[in-house]
């Protein structure tokens, strides 16, 4: 309920208080960090799954899950990503996103024999035609693109846009206050969410036994990324203690485990970074909403591991070229993953299609996805937080200089106005004197 107004108000208010050069510098650092960490996460996952080799064809036979699946075109999915970045209607983007679908059409038959005509009528020669349609779900990527554009333009308007900037800044404070009231009930909600997911699974112990090595591989990869890779990058770039930083993010971690959604955790991530760790609001308001949408380290690692695991279960040996394809596709697919629960399962279809693996085998890992989804979401949130910390380290001096310059300009303007008022008063007194 709070995600839409929170993203809009925080992004526009944050960017409107920066100039184009500052937002460009911050955006460049953030995007470079996002791409680097996602790539490292995918490579970590691939090395682990090839070393541990959790996939065994017997698992597929024992689980006995064979459901029909529909192939998803990689090209169409990435084109949908671009279409969603630039929505044709911003109102529709708040509740619908573009998705390519295939419909069956019958070929036009002009001259044909009776048997061929009967086959056409039976649907044996139907062709699949791609159509673009809207599916339910918020188009966060399109909203973010629109808000970034509005925020940058507002920052260029100067005093003409002050009223609008003040409106969004106040709106941001209102939404954050509302979220804080709601978060008082979060422990109850988180407990119920997790209990509900556990109770939905009929044979939890048997399923866990069969997929134990797969779960171990994913959890090892996520642990290495969270406890070694991200802290090491943060330490090298900022020369600060990463584990003190992580301790300040504890509330956001717990919320991510409960909600399994980066977007739903945003309010807590804002609060942890700003209040516990002293990160500038202008940085968090810009970096975090973008990161929650496109920076999915945990999801990318999980997709790479799951794809190679499915290949191993089917007895398919992937060549080096196919492994590289998995790594690139998993990196790009994680960018397109929505920041909502189990979004990684949907984008994993793209990775499977890219290397020619059966899409229906995704059903084999659904049984344990509820747990892995929560843990990888917490890694996604941690990656976003470290990104904001790194951007703050490199941008704080520029922001401080900008603040000093604005303060100096304000003081000079006030002094100038004071002198003008004094001169007017003296002139009035001269005119009034006999």
Image (spheres, rainbow, N blue to C red):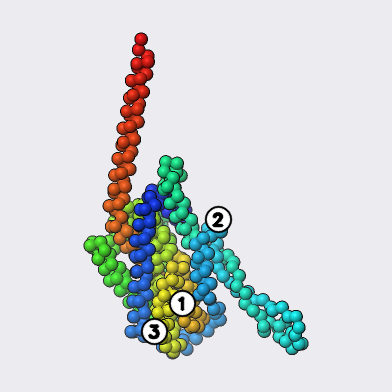
Dot placed on the residue nearer the N-terminal end, 2 or 3: 2
Q: How many residues crowd mark 1 within 10 Å: few (<14), some (14–19), many (20+)?
A: many
- Mark 2 vs mark 3: in front: 3
Query: Where residue 330 sits: x, y (%)?
Result: 42, 74
Residue at 46%, 81% (x, y): give it: 355
The local secondary structure at tag 3 comes to helix
Label total for image: 3
Asked if residue 381 can be seen in this view, the reply is: no
- Residue nearest the viewer, comparing 397 with 169: 397
Query: Where residue 198 sits: x, y (%)?
Result: 43, 73
Figure check: 375 above or below 156: below
Residue at 61%, 70% (x, y): give it: 131
Left or right of residue 283: residue 108:
right
The residue tagged 2 is 91
The residue tagged 3 is 320
Mark 2 and 3 residues: CB-CB less than 8 Å, in contact? no
- Which numbered marker is on residue 351? 1
The local secondary structure at tag 2 comes to loop
Separation of residues labelled 2 and 3 (CA atoms): 45 Å
Residue at 35%, 27% (x, y): give it: 420
Q: Residue furthest top?
A: 434
The local secondary structure at tag 1 comes to helix
- Residue nearest the viewer, comparing 288 with 59: 288
Query: Where residue 81 sits: x, y (%)?
Result: 50, 67
Figure check: 186 above or below 118: above
């Amino acid at each position: 309920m709070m995600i839409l107004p929170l993203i809009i108000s925080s992004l526009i208010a944050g960017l409107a208080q920066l100039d184009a050069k500052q937002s460009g510098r911050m955006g460049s650092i953030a995007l470079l960090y996002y791409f680097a960490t996602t790539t490292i996460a995918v490579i970590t996952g691939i090395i682990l799954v090839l070393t541990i080799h959790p996939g065994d064809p017997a698992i597929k036979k024992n689980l006995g899950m064979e459901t029909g699946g529909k192939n998803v075109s990689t090209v169409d999915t990435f084109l949908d990503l671009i279409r969603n970045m630039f929505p044709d209607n911003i109102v529709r983007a708040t509740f619908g996103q573009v998705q390519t679908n295939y419909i069956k059409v019958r070929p036009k038959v002009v001259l044909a024999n009776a048997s061929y005509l009967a086959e056409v009528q039976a649907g044996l020669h139907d062709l699949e035609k791609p159509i673009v349609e809207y599916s339910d779900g918020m188009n966060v990527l399109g909203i973010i693109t629109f808000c970034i554009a509005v925020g940058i333009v507002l920052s260029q308007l100067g005093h003409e846009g002050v009223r609008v900037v003040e409106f969004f800044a106040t709106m941001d404070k209102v939404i954050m206050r509302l979220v804080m009231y709601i978060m008082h009930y979060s422990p109850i909600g988180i407990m119920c969410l997790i209990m509900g997911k556990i109770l939905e699974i009929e044979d939890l112990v048997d399923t866990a036994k069969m997929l134990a090595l797969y779960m171990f591989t994913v959890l090892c990869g996520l642990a290495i990324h969270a406890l070694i890779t991200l802290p090491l990058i943060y330490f090298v770039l900022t020369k600060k203690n990463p584990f003190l930083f992580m301790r300040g993010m504890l509330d956001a971690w717990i919320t991510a485990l409960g909600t399994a959604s980066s977007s739903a955790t945003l309010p807590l991530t804002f609060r942890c970074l700003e209040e516990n760790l002293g990160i500038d609001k202008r940085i968090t308001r810009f970096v975090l909403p973008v990161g929650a949408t496109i920076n999915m380290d945990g999801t990318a690692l999980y997709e790479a591991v799951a794809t190679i695991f499915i290949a191993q279960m089917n007895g398919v040996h992937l060549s080096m070229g196919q492994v590289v394809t998995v790594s690139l596709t998993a990196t790009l697919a994680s960018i397109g993953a929505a920041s909502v629960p189990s979004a990684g399962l949907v984008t994993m279809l793209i990775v499977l299609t890219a290397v020619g693996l059966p899409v229906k085998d995704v059903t084999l890992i659904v049984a344990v996805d509820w747990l892995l989804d929560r843990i990888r979401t917490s890694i996604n949130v941690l990656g976003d937080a470290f990104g904001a910390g790194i951007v703050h380290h490199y941008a704080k001096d520029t922001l401080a200089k900008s603040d000093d310059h604005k303060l100096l300009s304000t003081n000079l303007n006030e002094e100038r106005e004071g002198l003008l008022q004094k001169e007017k008063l003296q002139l009035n007194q001269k005119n009034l004197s006999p």
